[in-house]
Amino acid sequence: MLTAEQTQEIKAKLQADLDRLGDHAQSTLEFTMDRDRDRIGRDSMDEATEEEVYSTQLRLADRENFLLGKVREAMIRLEAGNLDVCEECDEPIGYKRLLARPVTTLCFECKSAREQVEADERPE
Ligand SMILES: [Zn+2]
């Protein structure tokens, strides 16, 4: 169980992540709108390059949205008081680990075990 002080500290971290990711989602949206507005009068070379930038931007946005979801979930778990409970073994997750990575849902042991499985399944 986290102390009130530890909860506050992690909450501040999650909030900072939310702000950062939120800002970025906004600029991605602006980028998308600019792109549509500037469509007329480009040659195909420009368009190909633009397409590439655009898809990179979208991939980034996807990743950010994924992270944003994770951060929001962590915030909810924090409010519910079970952020530091490992979803796999119900053991407490260490505070230092949570502070370094507040969106984690696994204790160090379970995370290591899972990474080991993933490494084993990865094709050469
Ligand atoms: Zn665990």
Image (cartoon, helix red, strand yellow):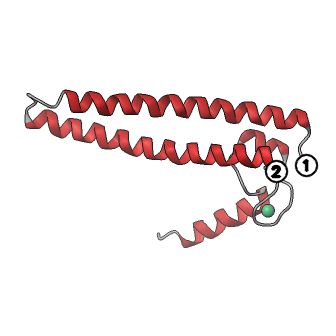
Report the label total: 2
Few, some or many residues within 10 Å of mark 1 (<14, 14–19, 20+): some
Splitting the image into 4 quarters, where does residue 89 fall? bottom right
Query: Would residue 89 be found to the left or right of residue 16 on screen?
Result: right
Residue 87, image x and y in percent?
75, 62
Residue 98 in view in this figure: yes
Instruction: List the residue tagged with mark 2.
Output: 84
Residue at image point 70% right, 46% down? 74
Query: In the rendered image of this protein, does residue 25 appear above or below residue 114?
Result: above
Residue at image point 92% right, 39% down? 3
Residue at image point 86% right, 36% down? 6
Q: Amino acid at mark 1?
A: Met
Residue 61, image x and y in percent?
43, 41
Residue 109, image x and y in percent?
78, 61
Residue 102 in view in this figure: no
Q: Secondary structure at mark 1?
A: loop
Residue 1, image x and y in percent?
90, 48
Few, some or many residues within 10 Å of mark 2 (<14, 14–19, 20+): many
Q: Earlier in the sequence, mark 1 or mark 2?
A: 1
User: Ligand 1 quadrant?
Assistant: bottom right
Q: Is ligand 1 closer than 8 angstroms to the Cβ of mark 1?
A: no
Residue 12 circle label = none
Q: Secondary structure at mark 2?
A: loop
Instruction: List the residue tagged with mark 1.
Output: 1
